[in-house]
Image: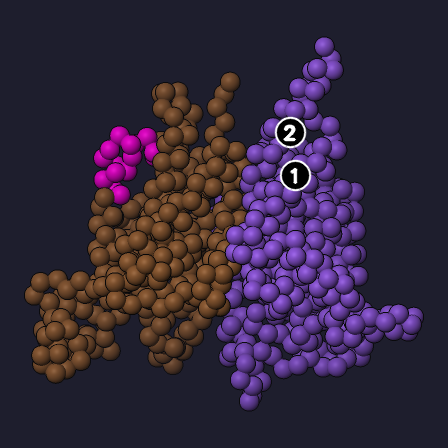
Amino acid sequence: MEKMPKWADVALIPFLNLLIAFVLSGLVILAIGENPIKALQMMITGALGSTYGWGYTLYYATNFIFTGLAVSIAFKAAMFNIGGEGQAMIGGLGVALVCLYIPFPHWSVAILFAMIGGAVFGAAWAAIPAYLQAKRGSHVVITTIMFNFIAASLLNYMLVNILRPKGEMNPQTAAFPDATHLPTLHEMLAPFGIAFSKSAPVNVSLFIALAACVVVYLLIWRSRLGYEIRSFGHSQEASVYAGISPVKITMIAMLLSGGLSGMMSINNTMGEAERLVLNSVEGAGFIGIAVALMGRNHPFGVLLAALLFGFLYQGGSELSLWTKIPRELVIVIQGLVILFTGALDNMVRKPVERVFIAAAKRRAS
Amino acid sequence: MDFFTIVQIFDSGLRLAIPLLFACLAGLFSERAGIFDIGLEGKILVSAFFAAAVAAMTGSVWLGLLAGVAGSLAFSAVHGMASITFQGNQLISGVALNFLASGLTVLVGEAWFALGGRTPSLFGKGRFTNIDLPFSITKADAEAAGLPLSKMIEQANPVQQIYSELISGHTILVYVGLLLVPLSWFVLYRTRFGLRLRAVGENPAAVDTAGISVIGLRYSAMAIAGILCGLAGVYLATGLGAGFVKEMSAGRGFIALAALIFAKWKPVPALGATFLFGLLEAIANRYQSIDLGGFVVPVQFMQALPYILTVVILAGFVGKAVGPKAGGVPYVKER
């Protein structure tokens, strides 16, 4: 059978896809009368030129690792979980309840419980769409979209009517107790004499995100369950024939996905805001889609893509401070990345495939 | 609650239902042809932006309408390219287009007007004006009597109240939207094109075997969806509102999608579903919380209700919603 070499599939095509997305983003910047090269330089200095910039880049990347892994686990089981945003919102609720109502002696205990709280709430929010997909055949894409909106309303209700302390005007919870304060990178590096920006929000959650990459890798590629998830994703019929229960895999993949999205809240809610605010997720659940597609649903790819988007996010907000280019540039880039790596993949793949096959034929004759 | 209040809520429910109706019919044509369209939201947004931007620059709402529809059509074309020509994932394409719309409208809006993502407010010929049907109580009548219009209508008899408040006094797009319902029904169920369109969403291979172009039909469905979604955005920015505001579509594309499922992919029920959701929004706007004999329904619940209802319908506990069979699957011609 004629096919492309593996390196082209794994590296060349994604690279070309991204290249098109970024060239188009550059053209967009050009079209609104700004200089794309200058903008890129400014983004690099803003996001990577100081420990402050790095601190924010890594903080955003932490969020995106969680949501990117979440989307890719569902993709592995051939499901498209657009509900990461809602699952992360409700996960934040879980984290907040744990932090507010359990008196913790030390942050190291608090973070374990907060992880469980966030994951359980996030997974619970994914459980209904998962169940409806598994048992009633309701399309998980539509139900998770609907659940994003329901989550926003629920969170709004909880913050305005129930969790808001007396005398507080903004819809937010009380500040979490001091014992739940997660050490920031500044605090962690100071004992070693390494100076890291004090005001950057990156915290110990980053390491949990990195550990999550490893765990997801082991789960998907080195465990029996992971094998079942992948084979279900490749061919439902074949896997049913092999004795894999579609209901079980659908439920487990979605619960894992929702749990990872929910766990993101240890970073933004517990680590950064130290209270639950209304718009704490800030679209990270949706960026997870771009991250998963770009990272080809592999934890290592997700890590790289999350770093890139962390850079774009921080660089983009610096850009909006110093130029007339608004932060929404990142959303445009995000859209283009999803479009070209996800939906228009064949536009690049087919011609490249033809080139390789033609070259192989020439060599053969 | 007196009679006139109910009429008023129905009136604002109708206004709020119209953008949903346009978008829902757009989704109807697209999904009936076998193409999932979760990019309705994005198309509404680009259309609203270009309609408001061009209307603000030229002072002509009709040029705005053309620009809005053109913007939406361009997005539809990209979606068609991704899902028909390149056989990509239609859901992913829709998601991407939603993000593109949400980012581009602000980016371009800021570059053109520097108003933080808004367009200048529209007035005069830059907006669609309300049409007063014959024999209705109009602003001129109210001024002659020296009363505010709503007071004047409230004093009239119930039939006149319904006629003047609910039926008369809307922009042309409202009437166009309502007329599109029977028109869509006719096109889908009484024309050859409609039959083929529905067939291509159920069994494209059969359509292909009959020698009819699957690609052509699907692209024409995308074009219709683009125009209709464009009208939704145009109405939002120039009829319901007076200019473009960042993220002004506010989930309407998804509610329209919900209405489409609610209506089981049929045009006449689509009117009912969108009107119901419009009414829910009108009630939520008017009452912050609703007291049902001691139990207070929070406003957030009213806002979430369309989504909750959709999930219930999708779950199949109240009548099963089954979409077109070939929906979401790219058609690959056999060689």
Q: Is residue A118 left or right of residue B58?
A: right
Residue of label 1: A16
Q: Report the disc number at residue A52.
A: none
Residue extending furthest toward the left:
B135
Residue B311: percent from left, percent from top: 45, 55
Residue B300: percent from left, percent from top: 45, 71
Q: How many marks?
A: 2
Rendering colour (chain A): purple
- Vertical order, A363 against B68 (above or below): above
- On the question of residue A351 being in view, the answer is yes
What range is drawn magenta here? B184-198
- On the question of residue B277 being in view, the answer is no
Q: Depth check: A156 or A317 in front?
A: A317
Residue of label 2: A352
Q: How far apart, in angstroms, are the residues tagged by discs 2 and 1?
A: 10 Å
Picture quadrant of residue A311: bottom right
Please tell me whether mark 1 sits on a helix, a strand or a loop. Answer: helix
Secondary structure, magenta segment, majority class: helix
Q: Depth check: A137 or B143 in front?
A: B143
* Residues tagged by mark 2 and mark 1 found on one chain of the structure: yes
Which tag, 2 or 1, sits closer to the chain's start?
1
Query: Mark 1 — on which chain does it sit?
Result: A
Picture quadrant of residue A282: bottom right
Image point (68%, 61%), residue name: A42
Q: Is residue A231 magenta?
A: no
Q: What residue type is labelled 1?
A: Leu
- Vertical order, A230 against A145 (above or below): above
Picture quadrant of residue A20: top right
Q: Do the residues labelled 2 and 1 touch (CB within 8 Å)?
A: yes
Q: In this view, does A325 lie to the left or right of A53?
A: left
